[in-house]
Structures are given as structure tokens and as C-alpha cells.
Amino acid sequence: MRKKLFFIFSLCFLFQNNGISNSRLLIQPDTLNKKRLILVSSSKTALASTSFIVLNELWYSKYPKTKFHTFNDSKEWLQMDKIGHATTSYYLGFLSYEIFKWTGLENKKAILTGGATSLIYMSALEFMDGFYNEWGFSIADMSSNLIGTGLFISQQLLWDEQRIKLKFSFHQSGLAHFRPELLGNNLNEQILKDYNGQTYWLSTNIYSFLNKESKFPKWLNVAFGYGANGMTGGQQNICIANPNCLELKRERQFYLSLDADLTKIKFKSKIMNSIFGTFGFIKIPFPTLEITGNTAKYHWLYF
């Protein structure tokens, strides 16, 4: 499921990178534009269908089918993959909401439709997994999908903005050489495959909770991160070419850092606004406190 998860996450990035979901570029009508709604609905259906076909050709077609079944993968990768599911669902919901707003759909309906679109799509992936021996329908994955979608919907309904965002950062862990076929042969693959180098963040915008007359920087966030290290297998370390990986200690890592909300930085140039909005899901490197077990470590810059 790891490759498929990041395939979907890449689709999110593709939307943002082309400015499709950037509300600062899209002109939102005051009333429902039925032509836009039909265009968006048909485009989303076509994109979802195409992605299922691609996923089937790239992964599912290589594995034998079976009766629908569930499986428990809640303990794999120290739950890093579950946070990945929540993050992907969160951004699918957010991006869908922005696009439906462009059609002129009433705000609450756009929020619920965007969230439902995300959840339906991610649920469909889980049901597909349920018919293959290699995987199975994962209740833990579905729970993570619900959490990510719920985080988006609840904030948008309560505050009409995302004050607490899920973000992502990556650094090379140095462990990929133990199992390059699983953790990645190069940097691009490792970003997607190596959970040891990934960190997921809850990035909170302080200004949004303060009086609007406050002089606190609008763009400055406080971020709480979670990562893990020492993993060359899902539930236990597996060594194929290098037995030294058995000496690795599987550990959870917790982080406290600052961050920048790039969407709060306004430019007169629409191009600059689009560029900054595109990378809004990436945690900006800042000085960071790391806590692993009983050990605290300080990083001048953490990626």
C-alpha cells in the first residue's frame, strides 16, 4: 500500500503545482455555476477512474485475487504509514473543497462534498486491497483516512480555515542501503519509500488563535512532529544482503519546531502566491528539538 499511497499524494501535489486548487488564483462566483460543477464532477470522476486503471496496471495485476478479507497492519512501520494515510486524506479533502468552491457551491456543501470525495476515494482503494492476497481491507488504514478527513472538515466548519495543518518533511536516513528495493535506490524513491527519513507534522498557526490586532507574525507556526527510525521491515527488521540491520533499534521520534505558513505570506504577484501555495504542505526547516526515548537532541536545522 505504500507505493499506492504516495501515488495518490503525488496527485495532490500535481493539483497544487498547477494552481488548480489555489483559491487565490481561482475566481469564485457568488452563485452556483452549473457548467463549472459539471466540469469538476466529470473531471474528478475521470481522474479517479484513470488512477484506478493505472494502479491496477502498476500493482494489482501482478498479484493473485482472492475473496474479500481484512487484515491487521496497525503495528507496521511504527504507525508511520497510518499518519501517511491521514495526511493524504486530509489534502484530498482540502483540495477537493477548493475546487468545489470554484464552482460557486455554497461553502458548507463544498466542505462536506470535498471531505466526502476524499473519503470515498480512499475507501475505494481499501476495498480494492481487500480482494488481494498481498494486502486486505485494513481497518487501521480506514481509521486513519477518517481522522485525516475529519481534521479538514472540522476546522473548515468551525473556523472556515485550516489553523492546524498536516505537513511533511524528509531527510535521507542512511538506512536505504540495507534494503534498497524496499526503501529506495535513489533520493526520489527514498522520499516515497523510506519511512525512516519521513517526518509528519501538526503545524499550528498561532496568529489565527489571537486577537486580529495582534502584532504576532501571521506566517509563524509552531509544529509538533512524529517520525521513526531503525526500520527495514514492517513489523520487524529483515536483512537480505546486510545482516547488520538486525542491530538497528526501532525507535519513535518526537519533535518540537517552528514552521512557516507560506499561504499567509501575500505578494502582489499571482505567480509568487501560486509558488508559495504550491509548497504549503512541506514543513519548512527550522531549529528543532528531537526526543527519542529518554534522549533529547537539538538540530540547528531539521529537514
Image (cartoon, rainbow, N blue to C red):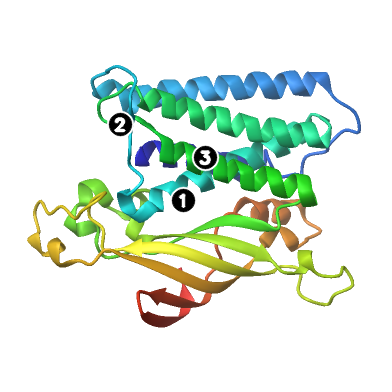
Answer with mark 3 or mark 2, whichever residue precedes in sequence: 2
Label 3 sits on residue: 145
Which disc number belongs to residue 83?
A: 1
Residues at marks 1 and 2 touching, judged by CB atoms closer than 8 Å: no
Which disc number belongs to residue 131?
A: none
Mark 3 secondary-structure assignment: helix
Residue 95's quadrant in the figure? top right
Label 2 sits on residue: 135
- CA gap between label 1 and label 2 equals 18 Å
Left/right placement of residue 272 relative to residue 247 reads right
Q: How many marks?
A: 3
- On screen, 35 above or below 143? above
Q: Nearer the viewer, residue 189 or 294?
A: 294
- On screen, 51 above or below 216? above
Residues at marks 3 and 2 touching, judged by CB atoms closer than 8 Å: no
Left/right placement of residue 92 relative to residue 64 reads right
Residue 94: horizontal and vertical position, in percent? 65, 42
Q: Amino acid at mark 3?
A: Asn
Q: Is residue 194 visible?
A: no
- Residue at 62 percent across and 56 percent down: it is 165
- CA gap between label 3 and label 2 equals 17 Å
